[in-house]
Image (cartoon, rainbow, N blue to C red):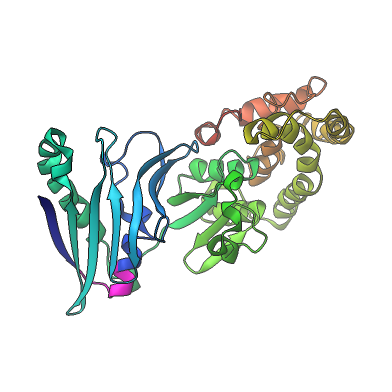
Amino acid sequence: MKITKSIFVRRPVDASFRHFTAEIGRWWPLKEGFSRGGERANEIFECHVGGRFYERYTDGEESAIGHITVFEPPERIAFTWRHPAWNTDTLVEVRFTPEGDGTRVTLEHRGWESLGESGRRDYDAYGRGWETLLSRYAAGPPAHEENRMMELHVFPPSPRALKVRALVRHLDLEVEERVVNLFAGEQRAPAYASLNPNQRMPVLEDGDFVLWESNAILQYLAAQRPESGLWPRDARGQADASRWLHWESAHWTPACSPFAFERVVKKLAGLGEPDPAEIARGEKLFHPLAAVLDGHLRGRRWLLGDTLTIADFGVATGLAFMEAAQFPVEPYDEMLRWYQGFRALPGWQKALVPPQS
């Protein structure tokens, strides 16, 4: 008892295999019910025998689908598949065979007899489902003609990820997010380190252009929507925005980080209790800089006056853990007034991941 489906795709065999495996997040119908719940971040194959096939959501939660049992690029992949309601695995095997100017892709889903009544109940629905999935897989243009979406590699709980994720949402850009789990060390994987040798995130891919450093990414994203005014058009405005972005990375974030690390990151990563000496060091750094920011904002709605810019996205990030990490913000009314206005932006709200606020 098995499901067999076959489809022709106008791609070379190696591109067809890569598109099915490493690029599965590009074509899997994320919004049409092919999900086990949660806000989707990505569909992922770990491309080696024993690797996982799973879903990962923007809040960091994961849902296992199966494991890879055969990985023979560019000819064959096989992986287990288990629905949460099933008591055993089934097996999916996909073969890629040259045919004319493209590739014949043949999928077999076996092991239904081991599921008993639930297998008989789900068999026809899965047959229709695989037809839909393969149609979506094959629907794109030939590989050399693809209009690729920008990809953003992020770890959503990080403030450095928050600023770029928020700007993407504020500008309503077409960007595919790929989660890099820093707690699991995924930034050290060779494939990721080839994108960013610093082994940090975020990283933006736009075709063959790879960009790291969060504030550089802010500028590049804002340039996609010049009409937004988020990156000023005049030299003085650009210099002013750059001034605050440099201030943020060189001074503000290092002053905010001790509170966030000691009172939030340590708890999330299981690294022990806050270090009082580090908290004291943070307070010594924080107060002079908060006073600078507070004084500058007096009489201004945004950092550059009446116009929201990427400087606001950069500097606001430092306060994302303000409540969870108990920042000593009480003396700084202008800073709090500005941040309250900023965090009301829908794009910022959509990008927040608890305990960010």
Image quadrant in which you'd find residue 77: bottom left
Decide whether residue 35 is among the magenta residues. Answer: no
Compared across the picture, whether 1 is left or right of 44 comes to left
**Front residue (pair 185, 38):** 185
Q: Is residue 119 above or below residue 110?
A: above
Tell me where residue 254 appears, x and y as whole percent. Answer: 79, 42
On screen, residue 241 versus residue 104, left or right, reads: right
In this rendering, the answer to whether 8 lies above or below 119 is below
Residue extending farthest to the top is 330
Q: Residue 96: x, y in percent?
A: 24, 69
The quarter of the displayed image where residue 304 is located = top right
Quick one: 192 or 236, which is closer to the camera? 192
User: Is residue 345 among what the camera can see?
Assistant: yes
| Residue at the spot 58% in from the left edge and 66% down from the top edge | 194
Magenta-drawn segment: 9-16
Residue farthest bottom in this picture = 100
Q: Residue at x 63, y 27 (%)?
A: 341
Residue at screen point 62% across, 31% down = 342
- Compared across the picture, whether 61 is left or right of 297 comes to left
Foreground of the two, 207 or 294:
207
Numbered label tally: 0
Q: Is residue 139 visible?
A: no
Quarter of the image that includes the C terminus: top right
Residue 169, x across and y down, in percent: 49, 41
- Left or right of 174 in this view: 4: left
Please report the residue visible at 25 percent of the width from the left and 32 percent of the height from the top. Answer: 85
Question: Would residue 14 be counted in the magenta stretch?
Answer: yes
**Dividing the picture into quarters, in which one does residue 33 lie?**
top left
Up-down: is 145 above or below 266? below
In x, y percent, where is residue 234? 68, 55
Q: Would you place residue 203 above or below residue 334 in this image?
A: below
